[in-house]
Image (spheres, rainbow, N blue to C red):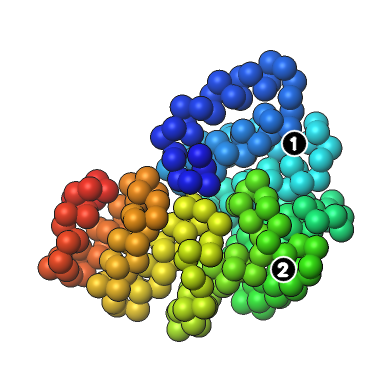
Amino acid sequence: MFHEAHYTQLGKTLPPLISGSLASQAHDIAARAYVLLAQLAIKNYQGYSWLAADRARAQAEITGNPVVMGEAAHSMAITMRRAGEYQAALDHLAEAAARLGQREDQLAMRGALLLTASYSAAQAGWRGQAMHLIGEAEETATRKEAAAQKLYIPGVFGIDQTRVFRISVHHALGEDEEALNYAAKIDLRRLPNAERRGRMCMDVARVWRDLGEPERAFAALRALEQHAPEEARGPKVRAITSELAALNGEIPGLQRFAQRVGAA
């Protein structure tokens, strides 16, 4: 449900899944259910993400599984980053990465953590650190045992995933032309699921918005709605839609889109 951006259905499914897994002491299932709850909160209900991520961490620690602990750390670090706690997010990710070994799923999890760390550093304006971390992630993605390895969150780790993150990392660093160069190398159809395709479309929309190209930004939002309709109804899309309407309210189709996503 999360991968296919069926967030309403996911929101209804998670509470009984969490309560059932806690009652049966299925700590791995509980941890991963809380990870999904944190991810859902990060997208739509930011204030609840701290609680969900912390509960994911607690359940993951009981399992002793470094991959499950990495998944929980991933959600907590995003929550920290969104609160402006960049160094805390990086420290948390580094601690989780240090627990991972050389097994295929552990290497892929480490790569996913490196990507999140790179974006966190970029958000803080720490270019050198951001480039070093994403370089490490790319090196991991080229390793045969980690290539296209399926993960619970965000879905698949591989070279395409590193390119998607390059868009957001370079954009955060103010390097929008470089961000677009990486976007041009990605075939959306190769991305593993609707959630990831929606993420890339949002990243591209932000780049075009900041370059003063509202028509192209809107084209990216329309692509997002096509690939992940529920993603298009989240607060981030509503915010950027309102910004585009302020820049050029005469863009064909923008007003109808704004009404559909609740930005009008």
Query: Percent x, y for residue 126?
Result: 62, 73
Name the residue at 64% across, 70% down. Answer: 159
Residue most extreme to the top? 23
Name the residue at 47% across, 53% down. Answer: 194
Disc 2: which residue = 141
Question: Circle 2 — which element?
Answer: helix
| Left or right placement of residue 142 versus residue 239 in this view | right
Q: Mark 2: which amino acid?
A: Ala
Q: Nearer the viewer, residue 189 or 231?
A: 189
Disc 1: which residue = 60
Q: Which mark is residue 96?
A: none
Query: Percent x, y for residue 206?
Result: 39, 68
- Relative to 155, is 6 above or below? above
Q: Mark 1: which amino acid?
A: Ala
Residues at marks 2 and 1 touching, judged by CB atoms closer than 8 Å = no
Residue 97 can be seen, yes or no: no
Mark closer to the chain start, 2 or 1 = 1
| Label 2, label 1: how far apart the Cα atoms are | 25 Å
